Amino acid sequence: MGKSQELYREAKKIIPGGTQLLSKRGEMFLPEKWPSYYKKAKGAEVWDLDDQHYYDMSLMGIGSCILGYANDEINNAVVAAVTDGNMSTLNCYEEVHLAQKLIELHPWAQMVRYAKTGGEACAIAVRIARAFAKKDKVAFCGYHGWSDWYLASNLADKENLNGQLLPGLDPCGVPEGLISTSIPFNYGDIQGFKKLVEENKNSIGVVMMEVCRHKEVDPDFLKEVRKISEEIGAVFVFDEVSSGFRVTTGGMHMVYGIIPDMIILGKALGNGYPISCVLGTRDVMQAAQTTFISSTFWTERTGFAAALETIKIFKRDNVSQKIVETGNYLSNELKNIFKKCSLKIDMAGIASLPVMEIKEDQPLVIKTIFTQEMLKRGFLATNAIYVSYAHTKEIVDKYLDAAGDVFAMISEAVRSGALEEMLDGPVCHSGFKRLT
């Protein structure tokens, strides 16, 4: 038990759930062993409270630090903004400049609203869309945050959200009156979506979905859902909190020529500084003026300054193309490792967010052992990799060398039936669980 592990043990006594973000719980990676706290982060490197050094080949700030931790140019822009005052009675001019930049990147859109987090922005988008459509129900596909509108889906069926991203989400605390107001559909299942629409076509005001998550993009499916949404008078929203900036500068939907009514951007937009936005057509976005959407810290300056600098670096350095190339290299080399080790593991997800799909028996045990053994070798690693511009070829090759050794060990244990003997502690969680 190092200082980080000891502090996390204390945190769970005084912070419900231990952390503010489920995805940062140590139990999601390596229960009792994960170094939950950092002292310093720079580029793709992290130092824990015991000054242990790691290369982060996992979630890179849960996808937010796409240019790497503590990027000097972005930090300089933020420090300048703070020096001039990060908050005032007046508005900072950067929010207008950022809106102009975002509309420049997405010419189909005319108006922008801001928040600090992806979950907030999703809730804002749903509120605006409902206000415009004057219909309450939301049909959705994918993960869209923690808000009541989303968790309400599990009021009707506690397993509704299991196939979207996180199983085990309990709608405790969500008003029963919201039952059947949010209805899930599955990516790629156009007949299932049509059936949902037929049963609710007069009450669906919003269709929200991710362009993709871990599956291959299905442009025909996206186009058909968009077409049907228009036919029933529903506002069509792409949630690009995770996918934005990972394929092109701005929204991934642009690559496929599918124009939504609204998109949501977050995570990578500020490269670790809190900023998110809802971007949409003028007609739809003006509905924001018919409902109350307002918060003091949505006007705070640092996120705007960071986002403007992030966009500048992306355009100047062709960042999206380079992280796609890195992601493809990682995926191809990992596939070679799995083939060499005779392991049933596939690679899925978009190029710059590759995900290992473990199809062996006891996939969570394998995932836990991989994290455990990579940690011993100086890597923060799990089954997903949020590729960053800071992931140099040298770092990636070090990771691949270590991963090759670890998967060879795992393969031998699978064949000999000694897999669980490799565990140094409990198996990682796969979804939401109450912690004790």
Image (cartoon, helix red, strand yellow):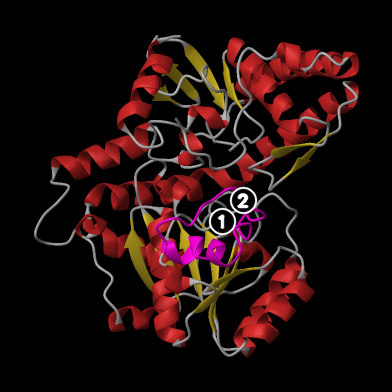
In this picture, is 250 found above or below 392? below
User: Which residue extends farthest left?
Assistant: 89
Taking 396 as reference, is 152 left or right?
A: left
Taking 97 as reference, is 194 left or right?
A: right
Say whether residue 150 is magenta.
Answer: yes
In this picture, is 388 found above or below 196? above
- Residue that numbered label 2 is attached to: 165
Nearest the camera: 311 or 216?
A: 216
Nearest the camera: 252 or 161?
A: 161
Give the residues in magenta.
Answer: 148-174
Q: Which residue shows up at 73% across the image and 25% down it? A: 366
Q: Which residue shows up at 51% across the image and 18% down it? A: 32
- Residue that numbered label 1 is attached to: 143
Label whose residue precedes the other's in the sequence (1 or 2): 1
Q: Which residue shows up at 69% across the image and 39% down it? A: 355
Near mark 2 (Cα within 10 A), the count class, few <14, some 14-19 or many ≥20, is some
In this picture, is 231 found above or below 89? below
Tell whether label 2 touches label 1 (CB within 8 Å): yes
Amino acid marked by disc 1: Tyr
Taking 9 as reference, is 215 left or right?
A: right
In this picture, is 430 found above or below 263? above
Q: Where is residue 167 in the image (x, y as percent from the top left)?
A: 61, 48
Is residue 282 among the parts visible in the rendering?
A: no
Amino acid marked by disc 2: Leu
**What type of secondary structure mainly makes up the magenta span?**
loop
